[in-house]
Amino acid sequence: MKPPPSSAACAPGCCGHDHPPGPVESPGGDTGPAPRGARYRIAAMDCAAEESEIRRALDPIAGIRGLTFQLGPRVLAIDADPPVVTQAVAAIRRCGFDPVPLAAPGTGGDTHDHGAPGDGTGRLVAALGLAAAAEGIGFFLPDTPGFQALGLAVAAAAIGLSGFSVYRKGIAALAQGRLNINALMTVAVTGAFVIGQWPEAAMVMALYAIAEAIEARAVDRARNAIQGLLAMAPEEAAVRQPDGRWLDTPVARVALGSVVQVRPGERVPMDGTITAGTTTINQAPVTGESLPVDKAVGDPVFASTINATGSIELRVTALASQSTLARIIHAVETAQASRAPTQGFVDRFAAVYTPAVFAVAVLTALGGPWLFGWTAMTAVYKALVLLVIACPCALVISTPVTIVSGLAAAARRGILVKGGIHLENARHLRAIALDKTGTITEGRPRLVDWSPLVAGADAEASRLEQVAAALAAHSDHPVSRAIAAGLSPDPAPVRNFTALPGRGVQGEIDGETFVLGNHRLMEERGQCSPGLEARLKIHEDAGRSVTMLASPAGVLALFAVADTIKASSREAVTGLKALGIVPVMLSGDNQATASAIAQEAGIGEARGNLLPQDKLEAIRSLQQRHGSVAMTGDGINDAPALAQADLGVAMGAAGTDIAMEAADVVVMNDDLRRIPELVRLSRATHAVLWQNIALALSIKAVFLVLAVFGDASMWMAVFADMGASLLVVFNGMRLLRQGRDSTR
């Protein structure tokens, strides 16, 4: 059984820093209930450290019904009465954060952060220049009180420009007895300044701030990798007016049911159903399909996809904020908030690691002169270097950036993973249960074979084809429709058409009565024979449904209809087996049909005649035999099994809302090959996670030893800390490339 979802809406992340502002609110509509309460954008809140600080600050305030953290867009929703919200905002400000009110979702309020500050590049460059000037004053100019005062003033200005926000939050953290990166840097830089190392203190703070800005941009690139797709949707749509004119209208103001025109080469502005025209659509932004898809009247199209060939008209089926792509992006953002197992481990480790190294730094400052004969200044300096090196930023940021990159890579391939825990769990799979209809097969019947049973010329066969097509065209039964679609000639006119419920249809063509019906109808008419029964058995053993054309003289032709296997299913099954995963088919169809389809797909075990409860029990049985099991399906009857499986995978394009809600993963284009891709991505993500953890800890260990027993400076400490952080960020972002390469 899969573990319950995390109750904390947070994404374990880096340490607390001021990052460049990101998007104000989650783009698109919700896949679940919208966050309730007053909403605030907090520019500096983009990871678990800040979330934890805010939670602790709000814990003592009574009357808060709930908090919803959206770390990607840096939005906090506070569910409380207005007076309590005011108290909460004041408490957040005391922590050093600046919450900015936002309009409620769906009110049409401004969704862009016009008042947010810039990224501070000029300020950081100026701080670096002042720090370099302070170094130059100390190195090149005479050591006189005047020049010392000038150098000290320049260094202080550099620290003020680059480190004001660090000091503000560091002092707030120390006042509350918390040790985060801001507290460590505040103590380290202040200590260096006090003991006379003011040029170094200034340079350390400037380099630290610049490295933080670089790291923040890299992290935002990983977090926002999928959001760039939403920006590709047109801002306006050509909407038909009551008088027939086409008027360009902002998509936010286009109502449901409106008719929109999309010309060749344009992007589809909104989700809709084609009402006029045919075309070819590039659906890669939504489904990850590499090849364009033909579309005609009645077919759905998605916002941000590209209309490649013909001009089409579509009727809008979803508001701009609730498009399929917007829902995907929102789901990815929500997934970023769930803690993956490795993230939880790292957070627990970091909670012990930071205070432990702080204690080591204090012992170094106090015990260094006694144990190693250092001067007091040397001991304090080494302790300050230890504090900078000890920052757990690289360690803590190593997991979320990797998980987010993996989630974004999956989304680019049309695989919507609903949380980091599911991305990690996919690598454990040992067996997978596959529903037949709509998952392995196309989910709709097709005419796969027909043969006349009377000897004669080609003209007679053509005549039989015309008669069968005519009768089938008058029926709305799925099997009849498949026969009509599969026969090429124009149907003959039919008179006195009659439906025979549960058996077939009957009609008069050119004065002769014909029936098109099933095995039961032929038995009732007394037209079955041992030879016919033998031919029927061949088709039935192959999982086909047989319909017969007959006249009073006897059965004239057989038409075999089957739900054909998808072209990608065999390749997907082969890929699963190569990964050591055992595929099993579960189907509600009869055992003969299930076995025939399973054999065609290369699946060794198939179970037929299964009701929803039977599928649920089958999953439990597979879990006992194999361990971790996935279930893949697209129907309401698959929902219990999807929920029971260790990993539930819904086929999204044709899947029901219930199946998609119950699943942990949604394959947007119904291509089974995405499942082995997901497993490979999960294994790659796990490998990168532990690479990052090993890199962060090994770099820290080397420089900690150098700081105590060697000659490590604060410059080296900054490069060790921020270098390790950048290294793990860029290593984690390598996973984004898998979203562009279907062969990996």
Image (tube, grey):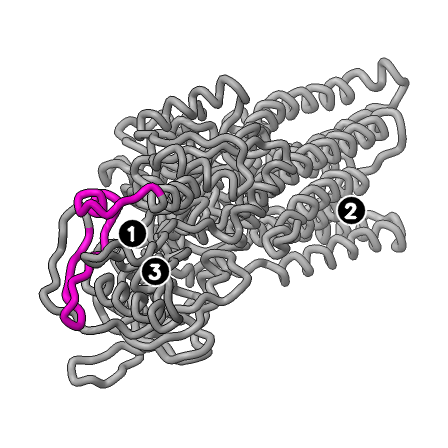
- Which amino acid type corresponds to the residue marked 2 in the rendered image? Pro
Q: Which residues are magenta?
A: 504-530
Tell me residue 219's x, y (percent).
59, 48
Amino acid type of the residue that numbered disc 3 sits on in the rendered structure: Val
Residue at the spot x=41%, y=56% of the render? 449
Which numbered marker is on residue 547? 1
Q: Residues within 10 Å of mark 2 (few under 14, many from 20)?
A: many
Labels 3, 1: front one: 3
Element under label 3?
Answer: loop
Question: Where does the image place residue 502, in percent across and percent down from the top left?
Answer: 17, 46
Numbered circle sitting on residue 613: none
- Label ID, residue 199: 2
**Residue 488 inside the magenta-drawn segment:** no
First of labels 3, 1 by sequence position: 3
In the picture as drawn, the residue positioned furthest to the left comes out as: 496
Task: Report helix, strand or loop for mark 1.
Answer: strand
| Residue behind mark 3 | 454
Amino acid type for the residue under numbered disc 1 = Thr
- Check disc 2 and report its element: helix, strand or loop: helix
* Number of numbered callouts drawn: 3
Q: Earlier in the sequence, mark 2 or mark 3?
A: 2
Identify which residue, 401 or 50, lies in the foreground.
Answer: 401
- Disc 3 from disc 1: Cα separation: 16 Å
Residue depth check, mark 2 versus mark 1: number of the one nearer the observer: 1
Residue 693 visible in the snapshot = yes
How far across and how far down the image is residue 170, in percent?
57, 36
Q: Residues within 10 Å of mark 3 (few under 14, many from 20)?
A: few
- Tell which of 618 and 328 is nearer to you: 618
Tell me whether circle 3 and circle 1 mark residues in contact (CB < 8 Å): no
| Quarter of the view holding residue 574 | top right
Decide: is 717 above or below 707: below
